[in-house]
Image (tube, rainbow, N blue to C red):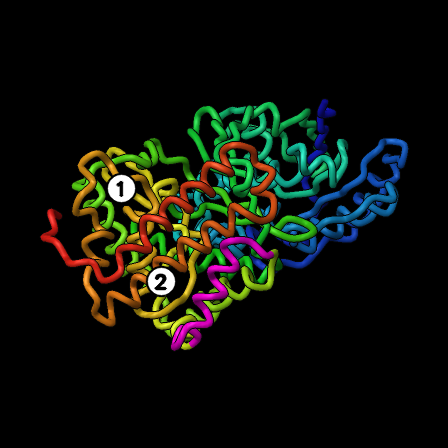
C-alpha cells in the first residue's frame, strides 16, 4: 500500500531584484537581500528533523537555493536543486524594472501584471510549457517511485508563477487561479500525483508513460526515461526531439526535467487517436510505408554530419547485443556480422533512422498519421532508414488474408546489390528486436513479452526465403 505524499511548497525569500521591483523570470539574477537571508534563516528555525522531511527541493536560481539551504541544514535533509522548479520565463521583460517594462513594452507588462499565461509575450514561456513542468516535478517527487527515493514528506522552494501553476495543477483548477504567493506563504499538497489519477499506458518493459488529465487544460503525456543522463545529454535530447518534431509535424515536447540519480521526465500534449493495428491489408501497408519513408527523409535532413555523431550507431546497437547474454538472436547476429563487408556496412553512418518506427508508435488521428515516439534515433548506412520503414510497415507483421504483394515482399524481391544489402539490414533490424524481448526486464513481462518475441521469430522465418525471389508488380 502506498503512503500518501505530503509536499510543502513555498516561494523563495525576498531577493535583491524583488527589492528593485525588477522582473526576474529565468534571468541570472542575484540572490537574497539581507532581510531575505534573515527571513530564510528564521523560517528554517521553525522546522524540525522530527517533521520527517527527507528532501528539500529548490530551483536552480540563487534566490531559491539560498532560501532552501538553511531549511535543509536544519532538517538534516538532502537539498536537490532542479531547473524544473525555475520561475516562468518572462521573455523580453526579464531584467527590466516594472517602470521600464511599462514604458517600453506596455502590452506585455499588462500581461505580466495580470498574472495569467504569458503566451502573448515574445520569448516568454507558454502556459502549456509551465504546466508541463509542474507535471514533470510531481512525477519526479510525488509519484510512488519518487516517494520511494525522496520520502513521503518533502519541501520545495520555488517562485511565484511556478508555485501558482503547481498548486492549481495539483488541485485540477484553472492554472492561473489566484493563489497566495507572498514570500511567507506555505502550501501543503496532499498526494498531488495520485490525486491527478494518472493512467499508465503501454507495456511494462517500456519506459513508464502516464496520461494525465489536468481538468481545465486538458490531457498531457508524462514519460519517464532511463536516459538521457546529465544536463548536457538532456539538452541534446530535447534539441533532437524539437528538430524532428518541427520537421515531421510530430508532437513537440513541452518540458524536460532531469531526475536525481539519472534519467529524465518528458511531457507533451496527449494526442487523441489510435495506434495502427498489427493486422491491416496490403493497400494500408503501402500507405504506411509511404508515411514512414517521408518521415525518415525529413528526419535524416535534420541531422548534419556533426549532429549524427551524437547519436548511437547501428554498429553500437549490434555490438551491445553481441556483448550481452547468448541468445538465438545474438548468435544469428554474430554470424551475420562476420560476413564479408558487413563490418564496413555496420560502421557506415550515412543516414539517421528511427529504430522504433513501427505500428505501436504510429497514431491515426483526425488529421492523419503521426509518429508519437522517436527516442530510438540511430545512425546507419544509406538504406538503414528504408529497412526500418519496411520492418514497421510490413515485414514484422503477420500476412493478411490477401497478403500477396506487400511492401517488403515486393521491394526485397530480386538479387541486385542494393536488394541484398536491404535484405540484410531488415534481418539485422528484426534480430535486434528479437534480442530486446529475449533479454533484460522484458523476459519477466509475461505473455505479452513472449508474444512479441514470437512475432519477431515468425517475421524472421518468413523473411529469410525472400532473397533472390522474382519481383512482382506492386499494388501501391
Residue 18 belongs to magenta span: no
> Could you tell me which residue is drawn at 76 percent across and 36 percent down?
151
Q: Residues within 10 Å of mark 2 (few under 14, many from 20)?
A: many
Q: Quadrant of the N terminus?
A: top right
Q: Is residue 362 visible?
A: yes
Rendered residue at 64%/48% (across/down): 259
Query: Could you tell me which secondary element the residue under label 2 belongs to?
Result: helix
In-front residue for pair 237/431? 431
The residue at 46%/36% (across/down) is: 451
* Residue designated by label 1: 369
Where is residue 167 drawn, in percent x and y? 60, 30
Q: Taking 338 as reference, is 7 above or below it?
A: above
Q: CA distance from mark 2 to mark 1?
A: 25 Å
Rendered position, 218 above or below 24? above
Left or right: 217 in relation to 80: left
* Residues drawn in magenta: 326-343
Tell me residue 137's x, y (percent).
Answer: 61, 40
Mark 1 Cα-neighbour bin, 10 Å: few <14, some 14–19, many ≥20: some
In the rendered view, would you say 448 is above or below 332?
Answer: above
The overriding secondary structure of the stretch rendered in magenta is helix
- Name the quadrant containing residue 208: top right
- Check disc 2 and report the residue beneath it: 425
Q: Is residue 131 visible?
A: no
Residue occupying the point 24% across, 36% down? 400
Q: Is residue 373 left or right of residue 264?
A: left
Q: Position of residue 57 (x, y in %)?
A: 71, 44
Q: Considering the numbered disc 1 on the image, is that residue within a helix, a strand or a loop? A: strand
Amino acid at each position: 500500500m502506498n503512503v500518501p505524499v505530503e509536499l510543502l511548497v513555498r516561494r523563495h525569500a525576498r531577493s535583491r531584484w524583488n527589492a528593485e521591483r525588477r522582473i526576474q523570470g529565468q534571468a541570472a539574477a542575484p540572490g537574497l537581500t539581507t532581510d531575505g537571508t534573515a527571513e530564510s534563516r528564521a523560517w528554517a528555525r521553525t522546522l524540525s528533523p522530527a517533521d520527517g522531511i527527507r528532501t528539500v527541493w529548490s530551483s536552480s536560481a540563487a534566490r531559491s537555493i539560498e532560501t532552501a539551504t538553511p531549511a535543509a541544514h536544519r532538517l538534516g535533509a538532502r537539498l536537490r536543486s532542479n531547473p524544473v522548479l525555475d520561475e516562468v520565463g518572462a521573455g523580453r521583460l526579464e531584467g527590466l524594472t516594472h517602470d521600464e517594462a511599462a514604458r517600453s513594452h506596455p502590452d506585455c507588462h499588462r500581461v505580466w501584471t495580470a498574472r495569467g499565461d504569458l503566451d502573448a509575450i515574445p520569448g516568454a514561456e507558454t502556459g502549456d510549457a509551465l504546466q508541463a513542468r509542474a507535471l514533470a516535478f510531481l512525477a519526479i517527487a510525488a509519484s510512488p517511485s519518487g516517494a520511494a527515493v525522496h520520502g513521503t514528506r518533502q519541501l520545495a522552494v520555488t517562485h511565484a508563477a511556478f508555485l501558482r501553476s503547481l498548486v492549481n495543477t495539483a488541485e485540477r483548477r484553472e492554472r492561473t487561479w489566484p493563489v497566495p504567493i507572498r514570500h511567507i506563504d506555505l502550501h501543503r499538497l496532499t498526494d498531488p500525483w495520485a490525486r491527478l489519477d494518472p493512467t499508465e499506458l503501454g507495456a511494462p518493459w517500456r519506459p513508464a508513460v502516464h496520461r494525465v488529465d489536468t481538468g481545465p487544460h486538458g490531457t498531457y503525456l508524462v514519460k519517464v526515461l532511463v536516459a538521457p543522463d546529465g544536463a548536457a545529454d538532456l539538452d541534446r535530447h530535447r534539441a533532437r526531439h524539437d528538430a524532428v518534431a518541427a520537421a515531421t509535424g510530430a508532437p513537440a515536447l513541452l518540458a524536460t526535467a532531469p531526475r536525481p540519480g539519472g534519467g529524465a521526465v518528458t511531457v507533451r500534449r496527449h494526442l487523441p487517436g489510435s495506434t495502427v493495428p498489427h493486422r491491416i491489408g496490403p493497400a494500408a501497408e503501402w500507405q504506411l510505408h509511404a508515411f514512414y519513408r517521408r518521415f525518415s527523409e525529413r528526419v535524416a535532413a535534420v541531422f548534419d554530419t556533426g549532429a549524427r555523431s551524437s547519436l548511437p550507431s547501428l554498429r553500437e546497437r549490434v555490438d551491445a547485443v553481441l556483448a550481452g547474454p547468448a541468445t538465438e538472436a545474438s548468435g544469428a547476429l554474430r554470424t551475420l556480422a562476420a560476413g564479408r563487408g558487413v563490418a564496413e556496412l555496420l560502421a557506415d553512418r550515412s543516414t539517421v533512422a528511427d529504430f522504433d518506427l513501427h505500428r505501436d508508435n504510429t497514431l491515426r488521428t483526425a488529421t492523419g498519421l503521426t509518429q508519437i515516439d522517436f527516442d530510438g534515433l540511430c545512425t546507419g548506412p544509406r538504406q538503414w532508414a528504408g529497412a526500418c520503414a519496411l520492418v514497421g510497415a510490413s515485414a514484422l507483421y503477420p500476412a493478411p488474408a490477401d497478403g500477396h504483394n506487400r511492401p517488403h515482399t515486393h521491394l526485397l524481391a530480386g538479387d541486385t546489390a542494393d536488394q541484398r544489402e536491404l535484405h540484410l539490414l531488415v534481418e539485422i533490424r528484426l534480430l535486434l528486436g528479437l534480442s530486446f524481448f529475449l533479454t533484460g526486464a522484458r523476459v519477466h513481462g509475461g505473455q505479452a513479452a513472449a508474444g512479441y518475441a514470437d512475432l519477431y521469430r515468425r517475421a524472421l522465418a518468413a523473411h529469410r526465403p525472400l532473397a533472390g525471389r522474382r519481383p512482382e508488380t506492386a499494388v501501391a
